[in-house]
Amino acid sequence: MTDAVPASPPRHIGKYRLDGTLGKGAMGVVYRAFDPLIERTVALKTVRRDLGDDEQAREMIERFRKEAQAAGRLMHPNIVAVHEYGESDDIAFIAMEFVDGTPLSSLMGEQPCPLPQALAWIGDLLAALDYSHQRGVVHRDIKPANLLVTRDGRIKVGDFGIARVESSTLTQNGAMLGTPSYMSPEQFRGEMIDGRSDLFAAGIVLYQLLTGKRPFSGSTATVMLQVLN
C-alpha cells in the first residue's frame, strides 16, 4: 500500500491567480493573488466550505460572510478595503486590498515606542474606529496583530472576522468572542457590546506602545479576573 500523494495547491480560485501564501490557519489560507480583469494584486482570504455539519463550522462560515458584509461597507484610508465576496467549489473567499506592510505586533518590542510614533498610530486607529462605528460596525478584536503598518507608516485596520453589524442577526449575544488580553469587561461577560469595547482595546494597544508590555497578561482566567476586577 503506497502513501497518498498530497494534493497540489490550487493555481486559481475563481478568476484569481494565486501567486503565493500570506498566511495559514485551521479553517483556510490567505493568498497573494492577482485579478487579471483589472490587473490588480489582492489578498485572497479563503475558508473551506466542506467542513461538515458541525454547528461551530457552520457558524464560522456565517461569520466569514459577515466579515465581508461588515468590511465591505467601509471605505476609509485606515481600513483594509474589501473588493468582493465569492464562492468557488468548496471554498468561500474574500478579495481584499493587498497591503504592503507589517503587522504592528511584529514591530512592538519590550521597549516603549517613541511618543510621537505611538500617538500617530493611535490617531490612525481612532480615525478608523470612529468611521466604522458611525456606520454601525463594531470590530470586537482590535489588537496589534490586526493592525497593519504600511510602508509610509500609516495604520490600516484589518480582520473584521468577528465584527458585529448593527443590522445583523448574528450578534453573538451571550458568546465570548475576542482576544482575552484586549477584551473589555462586557465581552468577557458575553453581554451586548458597542463601540466602547473597541475603544477599550485601543487603550490597551496604546498602553502597550507606551510601556512595552500589556496591562493584562497570563492565562485567560487570570486576564478575565484582572479585567473584571
Image (cartoon, grey):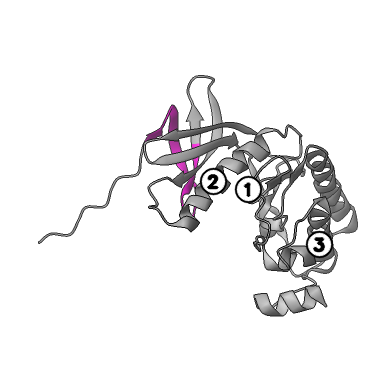
Q: Which of the two discs, 3 and 2, labels the residue nearer the N terminus?
A: 2
Q: Which of the two discs, 2 and 1, labels the residue nearer the N terminus?
A: 2
* Left or right, 5 with reference to 223: left
Q: Amino acid at mark 2?
A: Glu
Q: Amino acid at mark 3?
A: Leu
Spatial CA distance of label 3 from label 2 is 34 Å
Disc 1 crowd, CA 10 A, few/some/many (<14, 14-19, 20+): some
Q: Which of the two discs, 1 and 3, labels the residue nearer the N terminus?
A: 1
- Between circles 1 and 3, the one closer to the viewer is 1
* Left or right, 45 with reference to 1: right
Q: Amino acid at mark 1?
A: Leu
- Residue bearing the label numbered 3: 209
Instruction: Name the spot of residue 174 as percent of width and height, x first.
Output: 67, 62
Identify the image quadrant of residue 203. Answer: bottom right
Instruction: Name the spot of residue 10 as percent of width and height, x first.
Output: 35, 39
Quadrant where the image shows the C terminus = bottom right
Most foreground residue, 208 or 183: 183
Segment tinted magenta in the rendering: 11-32
